[in-house]
Amino acid sequence: MTTDPKKSLPSPASSEFVKNDVDRLLENGLADFSLRELLGALISSAGAAERGLYLAKTRTDKANGFYDRGLEVGTIPVEIQVPRTRSGEFRPASLPSPYRRGYGAEVESLLVNMLGSSRSINAAKDALRKMGLSSSEQDLERVATGLVEELELRNSRPLDPDMLAVFVDGKYVELRESDKLRSACIYLAIGLGRDGKKRVLSCIVKPGRENLEDWKTVLRGLVERGLRRVMIFIQDDFSGLQPISQGLFPNADIQLCTVHMQRNAKTHLSKIDAVEFQQRWRVINASWDVEVGNRQFEELCDRFTKSYPTWIGELRKKRQNYLAFLKYPEAMRKSFSTTNAVEAVNGQLEIMRRNSGGYFHSDETLKFKLGLAISSLENDRWRSGARITFSALPQLNALFQARFEGAA
């Protein structure tokens, strides 16, 4: 953004500026100033306004002008005027902590958000140049590189041997390669630890569509990195995946995602029958007892087997895998019946995909946005764990201990 050397920002010493700073900036031509100048003016005016409030309450003190100070908003150098009082006891709360020069965390957040909303790293850099912040390009590159490196480390670090639950699912995306789009699949595995917190165990991008060989590589990788005991393994009904999961984690319950099953019902059943199927499934989903749930499931199959023998026959074979969640505390049944934990990552990635024009502009762009989505979840929503999970944690750990002590 270019600036006119003849233009000048109003001084914070002016009572008019302190009184109505935003209006004054607009009147003087806001677009003609760089973000650096605007930040300096706003921080200065905030300090002056704070002093005004302080003096209104402290009649024994008086204003004593300003002194110049340089600070950094992240990597942006900003010049401000700091208001003083005669007693020296006043200090604007809008300044960084004493002996600190800047506001690093805020700008780090700005850069991360810019990466998330931009089509690519280069697009984000271009935006910084237009904002007059070319000095922040190196920091943006550092943030993006850090996200990609963290993603790679996440796929190689040793794992805790014990997990209460593991959720796995794949997501199809498109990447730009030269002037063409190519398909890729993101293979995600999320673990629920015995401490009640979720964490991403593996997040691997493979070219092409979802396939069984790639799932073998991903799941064997979890075992090689130390994962041994899983109480319940939640996945969709991808062909051939269930025997692999059961073979690698023989003492785990294999739960097939009930949301995927309900979507399939809409495909295989007529519209009227699909509505009845959903109603009957909701009753099963709310069953208070495993045996009751099993009986109701058989009744559901009997109701539709004449009209849809093939699909209902497959459904019936997998009854124990669709109802495994009923063995667990009521508070956890909804979580353990679907792969929605993976959808938390996929949902954020989907927003970034739409913001990028419907596809990712390179493999690197996909990886840093994937790293951003995971980092955002683990540092925010998943950081302290879900309240409902903690309420059931003693029961879950007791079930885990009983199962694996018995297996030993």
Image: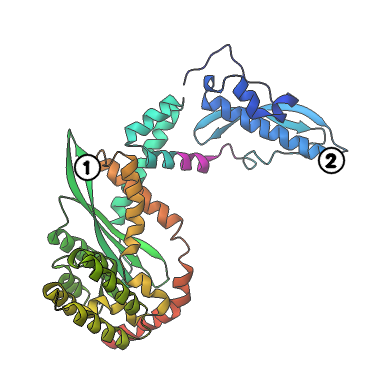
User: Could you say whether the residue bearing mark 2 is in a helix, strand or loop?
Assistant: loop
Give the vertical position of 215 relative to 25 (above or below). Answer: below
Q: Is residue 233 visible?
A: no
Residue occupied by mark 1: 175
Towards the viewer: 48 or 17: 17
What residue is drawn where x is 68% and y is 22%?
11
Image quarter (top left, top right, bottom left or bottom right) of the C terminus: bottom left
**Whole-percent x, y for residue 281 in the image:** 30, 75
Towards the viewer: 321 or 315: 315
Which residue is the extreme one toward the right? Answer: 60
Q: Is residue 171 visible?
A: yes
User: Could you say whether the residue bearing mark 1 is in a helix, strand or loop?
Assistant: strand
Give the vertical position of 12 relative to 240 (above or below). Answer: above
**Whole-percent x, y for residue 145 in the image:** 34, 42
- Viewed as shown, does residue 1 lie left or right of 62? left
**Whole-percent x, y for residue 23 in the image:** 64, 26
At label 1, counting other C-alpha atoms closer than 10 Å, the crowd grade (few under 14, some 14-19, many 20 or more) is many
The quadrant in which residue 165 appears is bottom left
What residue is drawn where x is 38% and y is 42%?
116
Q: Which mark is residue 58?
A: 2
**Whole-percent x, y for residue 117 in the image:** 38, 40
Mark 1–mark 2 distance (CA, rounded to whole Å): 62 Å
- The region drawn magenta spans 100-110
Three-letter code, disc 1: Leu
